[in-house]
Image (cartoon, rainbow, N blue to C red):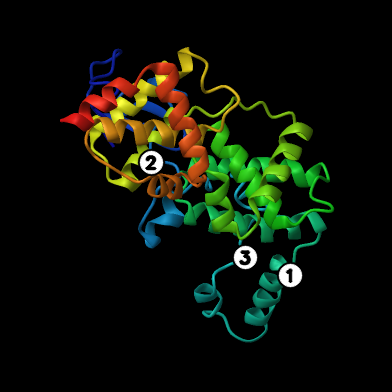
Amino acid sequence: MQNQHYVKKCPECGSINLFYNKDRGEIICKDCGLVIEDKMIDFSQEWREFEDDRNSAVKRAGAPMTYTQYDMGLGTEIGRKSDISKFSGRTKNKFFRLRKWQYRISTAIERNLKLALAELKRVSSYLKLPSSVEEEAARIYTQAVQRGLVRGRSMESVVAGSLYAACRRHEVPRTLDELSEASGIDKKEIGRTYRFITRELEIKILPSNPVDYVARFASSLKLSAETQSQAVEILNKAQKEELTSGRGPTGIAAAALYVSALMNGEKRTQREVADVAGVTEVTIRNRYKELLDKLNLEKEIKKIKKK
């Protein structure tokens, strides 16, 4: 096999009759026998094969390790049913028995992980979370199980708490109300479990930025890009004035959108904004008044109303 990619001709005899030994990673001159290259790196693909008939010939490695599987994805699967069906008699029964014992999980931790990670995938899919967040949540839950933090708590609440912690770490805005709806667990219970897990596992999480919620809330309220941009400007001013400290990020983000919508003539009721943000109308009203008073936005809104 000639290989023009690495070497064009033999430096010893000038021959172009070269042989690329793929198994040994060498390029050899067929005329004089000189080993031109050795210890070559194989840059071909590892596990991405889509044709079943080529898998056994080309595939040299399994899928990467992942916390989203109870065995970290390192378990060996004993044949597929379609493969086993080719056998007959005792051999077939033997393989079916091996498969049955393979799926019997031995330790309590593995049994817990198998059930919990299936629930974690379900909630993650419902909330449309990226795979990076799902992987982080699975890692947090696995650590919680190994440290014995699940005892005395429901599996679902620890799963929800782990997902919320992962969302916060990856700055993916999801509210406790959304997690409560997806998991069926009370949001106060999720909050308590989240605080307990992060404290015990020493997970450092920065406070949520209200700006992260603006795009989602604006999309749900069908507000324009101008309104969304102005809401971000209002929040940046509010942060400089320290109006956001000590206040819920969803409430102040929703209030900034409400103010921005009024300033751009896109009127939305406080009830509509509160429902999207998962807060009460009282919270919207209080944050709205604070923004008007501290940022002197009342005059601008009055001008718009007069128009």
Q: What's the amino acid at mark 2?
A: Arg
- SS for dot 1: helix
Residue beneath disc 2: 216
Q: Which quadrant holds residue 117?
A: bottom right
Q: Which quadrant holds residue 140?
A: top right
Q: Residue sitting at 51 percent across and 20 percent down?
A: 243
Mark in the foreground, 2 or 3? 2
Q: Is residue 64 visible?
A: no
User: CB atoms at circles 3 and 1 under 8 Å apart?
Assistant: no
Q: Name the N-terminal-most of marks 1 and 2.
A: 1
Rendered image: mark on residue 78: 3
Q: What's the amino acid at mark 1?
A: Trp
Q: What's the amino acid at mark 3?
A: Ile
Residues 248 and 36: in front is 248
Q: Quadrant of the N terminus?
A: top left
Q: Name the N-terminal-most of marks 3 and 1.
A: 3
* Distance (Cα) linking label 3 and label 1: 10 Å
Left or right: 118 as drawn, with respect to 189: left
Residue beneath disc 1: 101
* Distance (Cα) linking label 2 and label 3: 45 Å
Residues 215 and 71: in front is 215
Q: Quadrant of the C terminus?
A: top left
Image location of residue 218, percent across then percent down = 33, 40
